[in-house]
Each structure stands twice: as structure tokens, then as C-alpha cells.
Amino acid sequence: MSKLGSLGARLHRGEVGYDFVGNRKIWYGISILITITAVLGLAVRGLNMGIEFQGGAVFTTPKHMTASVAKAEGYAHDASGHDAVVQKLGDGSLRIQIAGIDTDKSDAIKDKLAKDLNVNSENINADLVGPSWGDQVANKAWQGLAIFMVLVVVYLAIAFEWRMAVAALVALIHDITITTGIYALVGFEVTPGTVIGLLTILGYSLYDTVVVFDSLKEQTKDITKQTRWTFSDVANRSINSTLMRSINTTVVALLPVAGLLFIGGGFLGAGMLNDISLSLFVGLAAGAYSSIFIATPLVADLKEREPQMKALKKRVLAKRAQAAAEGGPLEAETADERYDDEPEGAAHAVVGPRNQPASRNRGRGRPSGKRR
């Protein structure tokens, strides 16, 4: 753990780092491949919408039922002609969910279930959801998502700039597509809990992205006044300086969600936890990935298209070429000289260790030569 903390400190100070922006084409390619897979999953399999979105009925039997879940699923299919989702609750009762049926047929289905399960029909509770109400829920969910996206873009454009707003929007669409695509491939039911989880991970993804954007904005205030670093160089330093923070917050958030998904929903069989836990788990991981590998490199791409950034890059490359032709004086410069023209607040070196310079005034004026 101490080594991990030391690595985080070195990343923050700029003593080591990885060229995320320079390798952005690799990350773009990986994201495009994953997104295409998710879209194909949506197109081929589609989403398994719950009764809240397509209408149906939920029947709850009395306590301490002896019938197994498999038998109850067969009884429900015979009674309704539709596939059913059956869950055994903690008190021994059965929750039988049948989507896509007409509500006027619920009484006949209820009587048939009661007969097959050998219970009194009056002891089975039925909750009905009409298809029109389900359509309203689905429409409201999409409207809420659209309003959320618009507000995010407006806020980021005001707080930062429109390029960062566009990059954040692309990252959010990336996260939504991957999450919904995995839902389609896995076949989990989409419920209001899924929508809640989706909105939650979008907020988390934005938080991670804004942290990097804030660092980038601070470090590029006077970037055109120096000739040491391009915008992409500073963007890369911003990612590296916040990398451990992003990793730590993501791991801490994923651990309890993984417990819900794999232990609660998988091992213990609490299937009702799957709808929200899967969206949280996939979305948190995708959000952390997009904030590091998609959003910030995309901002760098957009900014490098500006005339002043093109001119800056040309000056920086010319200076580097001159330094290389003269035998690499950049490597021989003292650290005090090396960062005289860097943007204020910028972290120092991008890659590799650096030696701390001796102070120019060390021991000056003191007989002992020791620093106080």
C-alpha cells in the first residue's frame, strides 16, 4: 500500500507518467469496438423491459409455499401463455411477474394459478400495470435523461468551455451505450431501478471528468505564453496528476456494488438487486474509463485545431528540434531554468525520474554552509 501511495504522489508531482493523450487512437479504437458490440447487442437481442414499462401483472402467493420456482414458472406460462419471472421471497411466498398480458385477463390467470398451486384464489395478491402507464413511465424516463444531458452541456460550457462540454457529452453517450448494450447481452430485466442506477453512474462519470477538466483549465491559463509544452502535453499531465484519485474512488465505489451484484444477486439469489447493481457496476467502470481515455484526449484533439494552439505546437516542436540539433541542452538545463516558462500551477516533468536541483543560495552567507 505504501508503494501505491508513493506512486500516486510521484504521478501527482509529474515525476512519472503515461502518455494517455499520445496513445489516444488506441483508446478510441477500443471504445469504438466496445460500442459497436453494445449496439449490435441492442439491435439483435433488445432490452428485456420490465412490467413497469410494457405493462403486466405481479402475483404474490401466500407464505410458506411448497411449490418450487421452476414449477411456478411452468404454471404461470400455462395460465398466461407468456414467460414469467418467479422469485421466492424470504417468508416462503412466491412473486410471479408476467409482462405483456392484458389486465382484463388477470382474474382468469389468477384463478388458474390458484388451482395449480393448490391455494385459495383470494389469498393471491395481484398488482396490475396497464400498458399505457408503462409507456408514460418509459417516456418520462427518456425525457428526464434528455433534460439531464442538456443541463450538463450548458453547465460545462459555462463553467469551462464548449469543447469540454462536447467531450463530456461524448463520454456520457459512450457510457450509456455500453451499459445498455451489456444489459441487452446479459438479458437482465430493465426496471425503474435500472434507470436510477443509470442516472447515478452518469453523475459519477461527470464528477470524474470534471476533476480532470478543472486541473486542465488551471494548468492552461497562460499556455500560449511559453514554448515548452503543447496543449496535449499539459492535458496528459492533468490526467496523470489525478489518475490515482480516479482509480481509488472507482475501486471504492465498485466494491459494494460488486457485493450486491455477485453475492446478493448471484450467490444469494436476490434477483431484484440485479437491475440496479448491474447498471451501477458497468456504468462506474465505463465512466472511469471514459473520463481518462476518452473525454480529456478528445478535448486535446479539439483544442489542437485552434489556430493559436497550432501556432504554439509549431513553436514547441521547432524549439525541441533546435535543442536536439544542438546536442540536447534541454536535458542539461537545471530544473530552475527548465520550468521558467511553464504555465502557472503546472506539474513538472511528464515521464521519467528527475533530480532535484541544488538551491542556488544554499549556504550563501553562512559560515557553516548549512541550511537552517
Image: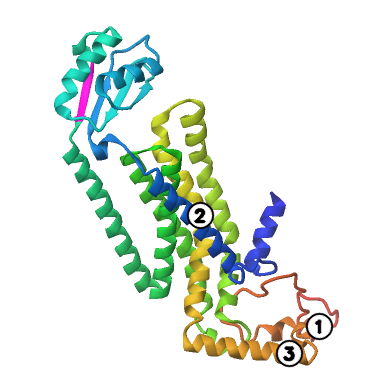
Residue at the image position 24 percent from the left and 12 percent from the top: 114
Q: Nearer the viewer, mark 1 or mark 3?
A: 3
Q: CA distance from mark 2 to mark 3?
A: 42 Å
Q: CA distance from mark 1 to mark 3?
A: 38 Å
**Which element is circle 2 on?**
helix
The location of residue 39, given as percent across then percent down, is 42, 53
Is residue 92 covered in magenta?
no
Q: Which mark is residue 34?
A: 2
Amino acid type, label 2: Ile
Which residue in the protein does label 1 denote? 366
Q: Which residues are magenta?
A: 124-128
Q: How many marks?
A: 3
Residue at the image position 50 percent from the left and 46 percent from the top: 253
**Which element is circle 3 on?**
helix
| Viewer-proximal residue among 326 and 98 | 98
Amino acid type, label 3: Ala
**Where 9 falls versus 116 (above or below)?**
below
The residue furthest left is: 104
Amino acid type, label 1: Arg
The location of residue 110, given as percent across then percent down, is 21, 18
Q: Nearer the viewer, mark 1 or mark 2?
A: 2
SS assignment for the magenta stretch, majority: strand
